[in-house]
Image (spheres, rainbow, N blue to C red):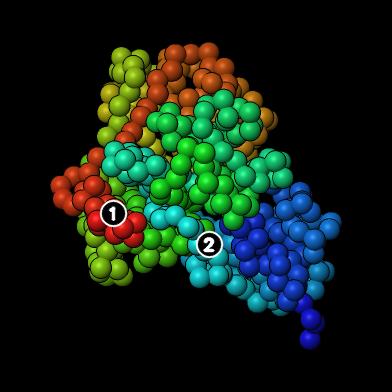
Amino acid sequence: MRDERRLIILGAAGRDFHNFNVCCRDDPAVRVVAFTAAQIPDIDDRRYPPKLAGPRYPEGIPIHPEADLPQLIRELHVDQCMFAYSDVSYAKVMATSAVVNAAGADFLLAGPDSTMLRSTKPVIAVVATRTGAGKSQTCRRIVADLAARGLRVVVVRHPMPYGDLVAQRVQRFATLDDLARQRCTVEEMEEYEPHIERGTVVYAGVDYEAVLRAAEADPNGCDVIVWDGGNNDYAFYRPDFTITVADPHRAGHELSYYAGEVNLRLADVVVINKIDTAPEGGVQTVRDNVIRVNPNARIVLAASPLTLDHPERVTGKRVLVVEDGPTLTHGEMHIGAGTLAARRHHAAEIVDPRPHAVGRIATTYEKWPDIGPVLPAMGYGARQLEDLQTTINATDCDTVVIGTPVDLNRVIRIDRPTVRVRYELEEIGKPDLPEVLDEFVRDLELANGSA
């Protein structure tokens, strides 16, 4: 028996780094010999840097493609592999476990008790059962409600560190200039920009213990931390209240995707979103599944109504629809807000961009062949943004419908008229989010001795 268990962490530049920092970095019984990367392009063949890995790892830790996993297990004499990414089907999780076990190693899933950090501030976690369920607008709705009650809210966003990891250890975003200064990708801007436009400070990074302590001590003050979850992962911080968003367009996925079902079972409140556009049977299926696995959760029904800044540019026009990238790719949605808005405003045609796709956009279509005739707003780096711009401008259309939350005109040059689609959460009936937040706020007041 070796003194140290030799471990590989399987991830996508997010939970993998967090699990290492919390569970492994200072544990003398564990030696992490590698990370593997999946889902996100251009993050393999790098290293988790020594400044973040700590004194036990003076050379840092290499990051390899997940496709190399069987060979890595054998060559590095690995005892265990920890699966540490999300928004994947149970079939994918277990297929990966088969690869690991066949190579001779144990397969691990680290749970909330070993990975959640405790805050000195109350924490509301906003999570989801799938990417693209509508968590972002739900989170904005919650932040607005808490701010209207006079509470100083700081948002901590699930990680998306695809650049200089040391520089990104702790990030604070208070202005749109911060997005450019910290070289955010489109995927990051999609999540940060709507908060910033509403005056909310957002934190993110790589080392989420350090991120948490900075958020708690934010110079603008902090009464409540809202965990803005991503990729249907569960929270990195121990929540006092968990709100999980479910998508009836993908009814049944809430019980067949990791870690979406974890979020469903942890929820104090489940928001069934998009009931205005989803099949009635899908809404009922999700409701039945919530009641079956988490009967104590309160259910909030909601819509995400769409608005266009220039609807006349869509009606009767040939349009190219650009949608949120992760929603179309590993989120497995075939349509998004842009497509729904184009149909609702009677576009003459939704133009297929696939014949004009170049470079890494073309590669995205090859990897996810079921995306269909819409364009995923992939922007993990400068090369991908350049390919996105080239693909848009090569597509013959009258108007470009931007269905992603970020204003693409700020980051690329689009040669045709554009329309931005916006969407916010709107509860249907009772209970609504202010009602379910009342109990959380009363408990907070009691804890502070103000009631």
Where in the figure is residue 120, as x and y percent of width and height?
Answer: 48, 57
> Where does label 2 land, which residue?
117
Spatial CA distance of label 2 from label 1 is: 26 Å
- Residue drawn at x 67%, y 30% as measured from the top left: 382
Residue 236 visible in rendering: yes
Dot 2: within a 10 Å radius of its alpha carbon, few (fewer than 14), some, or many (20 or more) residues?
some
Where in the figure is residue 97, as x and y percent of width and height?
Answer: 60, 71
Q: Is residue 424 above or below residue 87?
A: above
Q: Which numbered disc flags the more N-terminal residue, 2 or 1? A: 2
**159 and 204: which is toward the camera:** 204
Q: Image check: 3 left or right of 295?
A: right
| Residue 147 found in image quarter | top left
Dot 1: within a 10 Å radius of its alpha carbon, few (fewer than 14), some, or many (20 or more) residues?
few
**187 and 215: which is toward the camera:** 215
The numbered disc on residue 450 is 1
**From the viewer's perspective, is the residue at label 2 or at label 1 nearer?**
1
Q: Is residue 93 above or below residue 448?
A: below
Where in the figure is residue 314, as x and y percent of width and height?
Answer: 34, 19
Callout 2 amino acid: Leu
